Image (cartoon, rainbow, N blue to C red):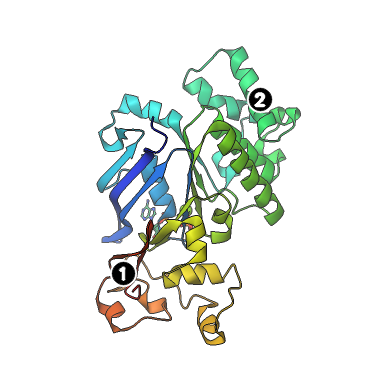
Amino acid sequence: MLSNSPLLQVENVSKTFRVQGKKLHAIENVSFTLEAEKTLGIVGESGSGKSTLGRMVLRLLESDKGKIIFDGMDLSKIKKKHLRELRQQMQIIFQDPKASLNPRMTVYDAIEDAMVIHKIGTKASRRARVLELLERVGLPDEVQYAYPHELSGGQLQRVGIARALSLNPKMIICDEPVSALDVSIQVQVIQLLKDLQKEFNLTYIFISHNLAVVEYLSDEIAVLYLGEVVEQAPAHELFKKPTHPYTQVLLSSILKIPESPEKKQKMTSIQGEIPSPLNPPNGCTFHPRCPFATEICVSVKPEQRKVSEGHFAVCHLVE
Ligand SMILES: Nc1ncnc2c1ncn2[C@@H]1O[C@H](COP(=O)(O)OP(=O)(O)OP(=O)(O)O)[C@@H](O)[C@H]1O
Ligand SMILES: [Mg+2]
């Protein structure tokens, strides 16, 4: 594959769920491309659609419309038997590793499991691989005999990572992989993911509600609000020039950006709750919470505006 052709192309995908007889727009017209061996960070509050998007990319959920192309394959056209191959190429790491591990399986069996299901290797070669993976994710040998309840959150997440790596995937979707961990452990796990990316040429989608967490790993960041990407840019650019008011609020809650006192006061917290996606506001969906909203924001839905090359924001206020 050409080094700069995207591994993943997501084009105008949408997903609605039927809830209480109404349509809930969980994901609305989302597009992005992701090059091999890079990381796309997806950030947004709870309910913004991060996991739904991740599950669509994995084809654990079908999108209502749009296209997802992974490694040259159109996922919507993939037959069941090829879906199996796809599962080898794409793995997921969850927020709660305990919930994603079978409590009655030892760590050894949990890591070997996918290789058994996919009929990979012999018992002996799988054993060598499990032990190698344990070492690679920083777990001592004897952890292989442990059951999930005997391990700490950080150790469990390392097991989750080893499991995800067992089939040598091209891409891993990390869905809030460190949110449930203590801060010091978060840093270790993020560093581990970064090292593994380099070593195994991995491509990541890294999902988090916390911009600070995605900053270190991401090459590109997409900010989701009520199922829509409201801003997207290379990571350093997004931190240098956050343009959508929502991104600015997310950022100011993790950094103390020096601002004029007046602006700072407006920015320190997001006003109000995230609206229900069952009943999204008219115009710009962020307007009820936006400190800078004007009349047009209340009535007219904004379009993507280019901030600079590769950087866009969906906001009327972008010049
Ligand atoms: N299977 C489903 N049926 C109905 N509604 C759903 C379903 N899955 C998700 N939703 C709704 O879709 C929206 C997006 O949910 P999603 O889980 O993708 O958000 P998220 O950004 O991952 O949130 P969190 O940070 O809490 O994990 C929410 O309003 C959620 O209630
Ligand atoms: Mg989620």
Q: Earlier in the sequence, mark 2 or mark 1?
A: 2
121, above or below 302, in the image: above
Q: Which of 303 and 121 lies nearest the eye of the viewer?
A: 303
Residue position marked by numbered label 2 in the rendering: 132
- Please indicate, yes or no, whether residue 210 appears anywhere in the rendered image: no
User: How far across and how far down the image is residue 13, in percent?
Assistant: 29, 50
Location of residue 164 by image quarter: top right
Question: As drawn, is 163 to the left or to the right of 46?
Answer: right
Q: Amino acid at mark 1?
A: Asn
Q: What residue is pinned by disc 1?
A: 279
Picture quarter containing residue 104? top right
Q: Nearer the viewer, mark 2 or mark 1?
A: 2
Q: Quadrant of the C terminus?
A: bottom left
Disc 2 Cβ-to-ligand 2 distance below 8 Å? no
Left or right of residue 294: residue 260: right
Whether residue 176 sits left or right of residue 223 in the image: it is right
Real-space CA distance between mark 2 and mark 1, rounded to the nearest whole angstrom? 50 Å
In this rendering, the count of numbered labels is: 2
Question: Is 264 or 289 nearer to us in this picture?
Answer: 264
Mark 1 burial class by Cα count in 10 Å: few <14, some 14-19, many 20+ = few
Picture residue at 27% right of the left edge, 66% below the top: 303
Rendered location of residue 300, percent (x, y):
24, 75
